[in-house]
Image (spheres, rainbow, N blue to C red):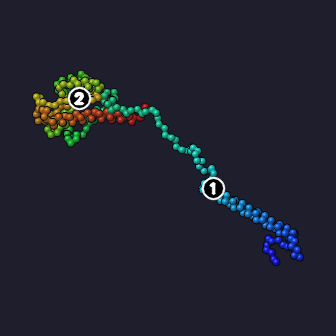
Amino acid sequence: MSFGQGEPSWGPGGTQTPDWAALADESAARNRRKKWLLIGGGVLATAAIGAIVATAVISTNKSNTSGKHASDLPAATGLPNETAEPEPSFSSVAPPPPPNPKDYISSAKKDRAPITVDGFFPGKKLTMGDRVYVKGATQQTKNCAATTKGALGSILVNNGCDQVVRATYSKDGVAVTVGLAVFPTEAQAKKAARQATGSIATLSGAGVPAFCPPGSVCRRTANSYGRYAYFAISGFTNGKSVTTADKSVYATGDDLTTFTFRQIHRRGELQASAAATAPAG
């Protein structure tokens, strides 16, 4: 009878008594095999874990550093970045308001720009909407009284008139002369316009015939803005008297006085703008 591996080995003679020495040797051999298997398995597991850790370290270094040294790495998330741009700051002091243009045409102390005919009445034509007026004769003089008719001359002089600029425009048989009287202060200009009687004298020439002859009726107006008083006389170039039905005469006078007002205001705007952009000191 044969026995497989691992079964007890019986001694000679068939006494059925176990061969204890053989069994001991066989048990020892099995124990040694188990020990080496355990040792070998542990070594392999340790090697595998070490390989995984090493791979993880290499992979982490490769993805995090990209070939850079540790000192080149960015600061940790959540820490302030010292190179960040500073936050904008705003002054609590409000900027000064822009200069008022009227301040620069209300007194000779501030209104220092040159006074010229072309400064107030530039070009050869004036367009207001769809209406085009041709500029005729012009004049600038310090003899204020000589530019007037009736009592207006003495009113200008008594209120301190410095000079008068005149310009005439015409269109379709209607002409208007505007006289711009210059005073040292706004109060003087207002008083002269309020007291106005008589009229500014018409200025003919440069293609415009004499108009508003003695005895005819013409339209007269008086206004002021800043230190300027401006007067207008409008009528027909054929000498006919003006009535309230003559809308073209009224429209011509209104256009020219509106334009004169705008030119005075623009003079203030230009000087105010220059003052606002001038360097301090």
Query: Which of 72/181 is in front?
Result: 72
- Number of numbered discs: 2
- Give the mark toward the camera: 1 or 2: 1
Q: Judge left or right: residue 90 versus residue 174.
A: right
Residue at left offset 76%, top offset 63%: 38
| Above or below for 67 versus 125 | below
Q: Judge left or right: residue 94 versus residue 20.
A: left
- Confirm or deny contact between disc 1 and disc 2 (CB under 8 A): no
Q: Judge left or right: residue 18 versus residue 65.
A: right
Q: Judge left or right: residue 81 versus residue 191.
A: right
User: How far from the left and from the top, in percent, is residue 99?
Assistant: 36, 32
The tag on residue 61 is 1
Q: Which residue is mark 2?
A: 223
Asked whether residue 165 appears in the rendered view, the answer is yes
Under mark 2, the amino acid is Asn
Q: CA distance from mark 1 to mark 2?
A: 88 Å
User: How far from the left and from the top, in percent, is residue 41?
Assistant: 73, 63
Query: Which of 218/94 is in front?
Result: 94
| Above or below for 160 versus 265 | above
Instruction: Answer with mark 1 or mark 2, whichever residue precedes in sequence.
Output: 1
Q: What is the quadrant of residue 136 in the picture?
A: top left
Picture quarter with the N terminus: bottom right
Residue at left offset 20%, top offset 25%: 196
Residue at left offset 72%, top offset 60%: 46
